[in-house]
Amino acid sequence: MKASDDKIWRIVARINDEIIIKQASSVEKVTRSARNAVCQRLCDSAGIEYELGWWKGFRHKARRDFVDNFLGTPLYVQLDDQVDIDLHEVPYEVYTIQQVRLTFRKMTLMSPDNIDAWGYLHWGPGEDEKMQLLGEKLPIPPHLAPSKGFEEEEIIALSDAQECLSECPKCKSEFPFGTLILVTENFRLIPANCCGHMIWLKEEDSEKKDDWA
């Protein structure tokens, strides 16, 4: 919806006690501007690089939903109206650095070196710098997800790669002890330490698919 000459769309956001005010001629533009401002501050707080186009596409819906938690209600106001935080229903959202890094960099962190034999994804050396992948959702690579229903899937099981496969599909060598297979409903992801690759397979690609869960 477009604004008239004397009215404008306004969104107020709050992050780390900082109030962010954005105004634009349409609700779409002001929402995008407010989202970008919040995302920039979240990335700065987590020490990660701000990614242009971070919000685009269905695959990044989780990112948009996370950022939207910091935004107040868009209001159509007079240009000279004073900002009323209560009127915009600006939330006071509490977040952790872990949430930010996993929301915006989960697949960057997903490498064989960062996934241990118990299914934990590590982003640092500390005991509090890891998360259990079982139950988490994985974004599915576009070349494996031709239909809209496959953008992400939940990890429903962790399997032992040595018990499921005789060799690595990529380098044809034996899997090191502790190599896992992350199992979703339709896909399998192998963090292969033998060759350093993250190997994606469709469920039907496994000759021993009955043993994968």
Image: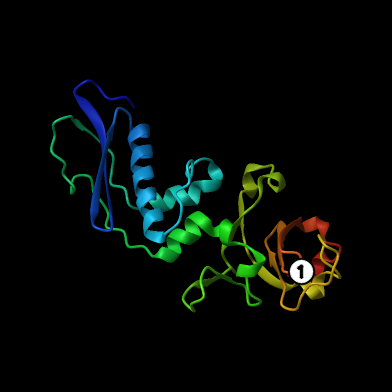
Above or below, comparing residue 156 to residue 51 in the picture: below
Residue 115, quarter of picture: bottom right
Mark 1 burial class by Cα count in 10 Å: few <14, some 14-19, many 20+: some
Q: Is residue 153 left or right of residue 194?
A: left
Q: Is residue 90 left or right of residue 142?
A: left
Q: Nearer the viewer, residue 99 or 124?
A: 124
Residue 158, quarter of picture: bottom right
Residue 195 position within the rendered picture, expressed as x and y whole percent measured from the top left: 76, 64
Q: Quadrant of the C terminus?
A: bottom right
Residue 91, quarter of picture: bottom left
Above or below, comparing residue 83 to residue 102 in the picture: above
Above or below, comparing residue 128 to residue 108 in the picture: below
Which residue does the image show at 54% across and 43% down from the upper left? 58
Badge 1 is on which residue? 194
Which residue does the image show at 69% across and 42% down from the upper left? 146
Q: Is residue 158 left or right of residue 97?
A: right
Q: Nearer the viewer, residue 2 or 195?
A: 195
Q: Is residue 116 left or right of residue 128?
A: right
Q: Quadrant of the N terminus?
A: top left
Name the secondary structure under disc 1.
loop
Residue type (three-letter) at the residue carrying disc 1: Cys
Q: Nearer the viewer, residue 208 or 198?
A: 198
